[in-house]
Image (spheres, helix red, strand yellow):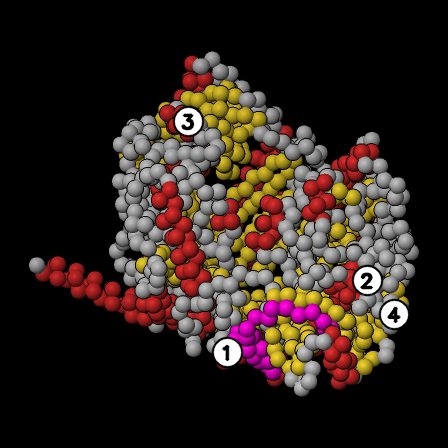
Amino acid sequence: MKPKFLTMVVLITLLFSSAASAQDDITLQAMQEELGRAMKILGRAKPVSLYFLSYQIWDEHEIYLNASEGALYYDSDEYRRYLDVDVRVGSSKLDNTHEIRGSEYDYMSWIPSIIEVPIDDDPNSLKAILWSHTDKEFKDAQENFTKVLAEKQVKVAETDTSPDFSSTRPQQYYEPPRTFDVDFQVWHDKLRELSLRFKNHPWVYNSQVSLRATNLSKYLVNSDRNRIRENRLMYRLSIYAATMAEDGMELNLSYSFFATAAAEFPADSEIISEIDTLIAHLDALRKAPVVEPYIGPAILINRASGVFFHEIFGHRIEGHRQKSEFEGQTFTKKVGEQILPEFISVYDNPTLTTFEGKVLNGHYKFDDEGVAAENVVVVDHGILKEFLMSRSPIENFPSSNGHGRRSYGKDIVSRQGILHIDSEKEVTFAELRQALIDECRNQNKEYGLIFYDIAGGFTSTGRGGTQTFKVIPLFVKRIYVDDRADEVVRGVDIVGTPLLSFSKIRMTGDDYGIFNGTCGAESGWVPVSSISPSIFVTEIEVEKKAKGQDKPPILPAPSPGIGKRRSL
Amino acid sequence: MKRYVIALALIVLMLPANEPDNPILFQAAADELQRNIKKLRIEKQLKPYYIAYRILDSESVEMAATFGGLLYSTDRQDRDAYISVRVGSYEIDNSNFMCQTRSSGIIESEHTNLPLDDDYDAIRDALWLVTDGTYKKALEVFSRKKATLQNQPSKDTTPDFSKVTPSANMQPPVHLEIDRTAWESRIVALSEIFKRFPGIQESEVSFRAHAVNQYFLDTEGNRSCSPRLIAAIEVSAKTQSHDGELLEQNYGFYGRVDRDLPDLEVMQQKVTAMAETLSLQTSLEKEEGYSGPVLFIGQAAAELFFQILGKGVSAPRSPMFENEMMSRMQKGDNMGILTNRFGRRVMADFLSAYDDPILADWQETPLFGHFTIDDEGVPAQRVDLVEDGKLTSVLMSRAPIKKIRTSNGHGRYCYQRSGTRYCGMVANLVVMGSPGRPYDELKELLFDMCRDFDITHGLIITRLAPTKSLTTEEQYMRYFSASGADEPLLSCPVIAYRVDVQSGAAQLVRGLDFSSVTPRALRDIVAVGDKEYVHNFLYRDNNDNEHPMSVVAPAVLVEEMDLVGKESKPKRLPILKHPYF
């Protein structure tokens, strides 16, 4: 009895303290007041009333520095606040967001509606903007709801009869504002110096070293009693280099370090070593032979595998794609069925902050609908269990698991956060490599491929297109079955169909690695991560990359060094 | 020895005025330009006959406020380079031709960012790569142009590019000196005015100042450094009339530096007046129409001349199009519609007009459109456009036309419907007429004409809607429908008064729009005022490029115009009342 009581006291105190600081927050307070006023009046409006209202404010301070060849190119410092207003009229069973079947795809929905609000905590001006946009959104929602009702009358019954909106637990959460802890003046010179390392390689046509520091504070107040202020402070240090092969093929490589505090920045020696590796790889690439179309065994190195899973698998387990009549619905009817080898489980867990000491870019505590992020077991031992859910329910999955995400100005859909591929059939990398060679012999192949880096890709999940994918490898090696050395090759894209590709995974390495990035889809750009071991597949298909027709630069780069001549 | 050092130092100090102030940037660009014109060539292909680098080294401050709250406040530095490469010859080259190439949209000059640091190597490196790409694109465009010419033979042998006498003109660079905090508090104060106007739904006040140094150098030997300065406060407010029609008013204060802008009190008075007018309009009934004489005064008279005459004598060289669809996209922006009327009457015979970018001020008022060197590195010149009503010249870039083979220093890099090109454009347009009549006399004349027309009220317009760039949605619609509506020749009145012929009482009206205005309107001018109004404004093309311009014009009385009730889609009024009021 006693211990329980203690826990309760602690909990109450915690809740109380966080609520107290939230009370002092002028912005949250103004949002709450205007929301209350709007709900009260519009909640009784005719012919159809408001049943849900959400205000989200993105308080974003972003510093971007970029240097190339020893000179600073960008030095920007922007502080802005953006607003999203989400309204729902009707009822959670049927509301204005309901998909209207057979309508033309609304390409206009891709244009974000950017609304700025004051940065100086002035409640009157904020309320005036909240008011005018609530009014607009509400009237649009009423109009749309009429269309939804009309469509219901004339079309056949829908396959998925789930309601349009799910309920959620009220959440109160408050983080006080944070500030950058990095001296950006020091970084001006540091970036200049780091970027000079490319200068001794005149064949590098474009190179950049950049630092993007983002201090984002997201305020969310909605009529379901959610009141949240969550921060995201991230530094991203990126290196990039591009060149062109003699045949006109454009080649580029990049690498990013992520940190949430100055202390997490890589040591200079580590950055320099990564730059040197990048240069060496790019040099090898431009001299590398172009690969012919190939079907055969391959290994995807951990971070390449992470991108592969994100593109090919991750986007297909996003909940809203199971419902929309525009979608191909690869996995919709496959819950409970085996879709991956039984030694593989897949989670999406945005609550993770680090993996093996490394920062995860995809972390968040609450999604953009104010739902606490959950670790979703998507695939358990090969069996499909669950989808990534926003508050838009689908058949058999009535509630959100905290994956409703967007960038400001966009409508929320379910998105990935941190996709985690877990394997029970792990071998050392040496063994994995041997397995690749053995399989090549088995299939009478001269060589197999190892994909070290993948830029990203395109995957068509839509019903109108074919259910294929294409991913863009950046750095690939040929591994020969005989004793020839590994050989860098270029000019390949991986293509295939998702279901078939996953069935070819034979085993994985024990070398889990992370990929941090930003993912773009219909709800905008969101930070994501993938964690994956290297995977060995018995069959992968590559095709020739479409190549630029331009020749490499005609004149050599202006000879370096003459810059020392400062006088005229 | 010491004396020798001093002597040397003196020599360095006494360098001729034509040395650039930014030696490293200029030298890097000059060296790369020389290397490229000498060596850049793909085997068996044409080599460039002309290369130009235009570098804009700019400092900006931008901020905005609404309803007493600061929306943003930023300062930034940019260094943009525009690279032009021409292959062929002055007679026929890759310019004045619109085709969609693989690499980018239709543009005459490729853009790249240059480093902000004065780093000789890095600047050359950036220019090198883009010059290379621009040359390859020029070759591609030129070959497609020749192919198109084979299919659509043209009798017009007007050259593509005019020659200029090389000149050097190095003016000292300018820098921004802005007290950001002071301006933040001023725009917040201006935005607070709207807290007194419950009828106004949305409002915004923005301030911006730019100091741009243009460095220009080309392979003909032109070298210049010329500064451009602008400082502007723009105010916009939106609301709905009692019957749901959207209403909007804009007001601007423009100068070259922030000192040119009026004192806060003066601005507060003007913004208050604007808010009062807009508030008043919400309660007015919509006008159904008007036919009869119209008196344009102030901004309205200046806009009348800009929109019909200014645009009409701009961009005289129309490009050739690779295909029909592109030429259709070109229609309807009203540029150059007067340029085929040389020697013919375009305005009433007591009116004359010229454009003079060199004018820095009109009496005490700074002119926004002032520059000394145009975007093609050509020294600006005064151009007499209309003499005694007859068209004598047009605004020329280096793209010749049949009648005029040389530039008159009005070239600006501007987006028209189908691409970004160097076009002759308005800088400081000055319209004069005589005899100039005092306002009361003009009004009497208006009343007399109304009596002749047998109408009880005359119309006085003081403000026309400013030319605005397209919204994202409009651009998108245009992109997908490949056309979009033609722009009307004259934008609708936003402040107009019905004046009683008997009593002289003026009544504010709303919701009028011009019906089928033709360039004839300028010939139908029957009288002009005796005071010039200076209208400074930012002309925004459809790619959001801003071109500072000035129009100096007297009030004018137009014999007869037709106005109708403006087409609009009324929206429901707000359901909730404004939270502040």
Labels 1 and 2: the sequence-earlier one: 1
Q: Magenta part of the protein: which range?
A: B267-294
Chain on which label 4 sits: B
Residue A189 in view in this figure: no
Q: Name the residue under label 1.
A: B197
Q: Are marks 1 and 4 in contact (CB under 8 Å)?
A: no
Q: Marks 1 and 4: which is nearer the front? A: 4
Per the image, label 2 sits on a secondary structure element best described as loop
- Of residues B468 and B332, the one nearer the viewer is B332
Q: In this view, does B440 lie above or below A34?
A: below
Chain on which label 2 sits: B
Residue at point 83% right, 42% down? Answer: B93
Q: Mark 4 points at which residue?
A: B349
> Residue B157 vs residue B426: left or right?
right
Per the image, label 4 sits on a secondary structure element best described as loop
Residue B544 in view in this figure: yes
Q: Could you say which disc has been placed on residue A501 in the image?
A: 3
Q: How many numbered dots are placed on residues in this image?
A: 4
| Number of other residues with Cα within 10 Å of mark 2, as a class: few under 14, some 14 to 19, many 20 or more | many
Quadrant that contains the C terminus of chain B:
bottom left
Q: Could you say which disc has been placed on residue B373 in the image?
A: 2
Secondary structure character of the magenta stretch overall: helix
- Of residues B422 and A212, the one nearer the viewer is B422
Specify the amino acid type for callout 4: Asp
Asked if the magenta segment contains residue B453, the reply would be no
Residue at point 51% right, 73% down? Answer: B200
Q: Distance between the residues labelled 1 and 4?
A: 46 Å
Q: How far apart are marks 4 and 3 (CA)?
A: 80 Å
Asked if the magenta segment contains residue B278, the reply would be yes
Q: Residue furthest left?
A: A1
